[in-house]
Amino acid sequence: MKQELLGVKAPKMVEGESDINCPFHGKINVKNETINGVVVKKDSHGTATIEWKSSIFVPKYERSQIKTRRIRVHNPACINAEVGQKVMVARTRPISKTKHHVIIKIYENEKVELSLGESAAEDRAKKSKRKAKVVEEKVEKSDNVAEPEVIEESKEDSTEEKVPEEKNQ
């Protein structure tokens, strides 16, 4: 059992844990490459998906672009990170076809709110309600507008003949 990895103290071992891919209680070694991200999905069999954002400068448009990256990681039973928690991940040898990292630390007191699923649907519903309200206000304003007054021309003005101007020679 390792007491400390990359400055992170080992968590207490869970009863009945026999995970050989645990960096603290198992036999897997970690490299000195770490990533900080948020757990966005938790699967069975000790797998999780983390996500992090990075800003990249695009020279063609002279602007910064935010890219979102995701990787699959091993979630040991002694750590057991939940969805929305901010975690530190370290690189390891390949654990499976898609997993090459393992969670080594959960940042306490930092739970990130994810705008996925229901909350995104709620945002879309609010947006459509706002649009409907704006359309209703426009219709009400157009109904309240007074009709323009029609000014009738007098018969004298319309029958007047126009005299052409003579050109000075």
Image (cartoon, rainbow, N blue to C red):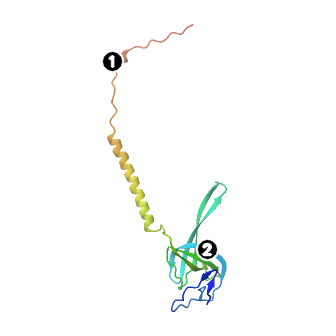
Quarter-of-image position of residue 91: bottom right
Residue 155 relative to residue 45: left or right:
left
Q: Secondary structure at mark 2?
A: strand
Q: Amino acid at mark 2?
A: Ile
- The label nearer to you, 2 versus 1, is 2
Q: Quadrant of the N terminus?
A: bottom right
State which tag comes first along the sequence, 2 or 1: 2
In the rendered image, the vertical position of residue 154 relative to residue 59, given as above or below: above
Tag 1: Cα neighbours inside 10 Å, few (<14), some, or many (≥20)? Answer: few
Residue at position x 38%, y 56% in the image = 129
Q: Quadrant of residue 9?
A: bottom right
Q: Position of residue 167 (x, y in %)?
A: 53, 10
State the residue at coordinates (58%, 74%): 71
Amino acid type of the residue tagged 1 in the rendering = Lys
Q: How many marks?
A: 2
Q: Residue at left 63%, top 83%?
A: 5
Q: Which residue is mark 2?
A: 35
Mark 2 residue crowding within 10 angstroms, few (<14) / some (14–19) / many (20+): some
Where does the image place residue 69, in percent across and percent down from the top left?
Answer: 59, 69
Badge 1 is on which residue? 155
Q: Position of residue 138 (x, y in %)?
A: 37, 46
Front one among 15 and 138: 15
Query: Relative to 121, is 31 on the left or the right?
Result: right
In the image, 27 versus 45, the foreground residue is: 27
Measuring from the top left, give residue 108's x and y in whole percent.
52, 76
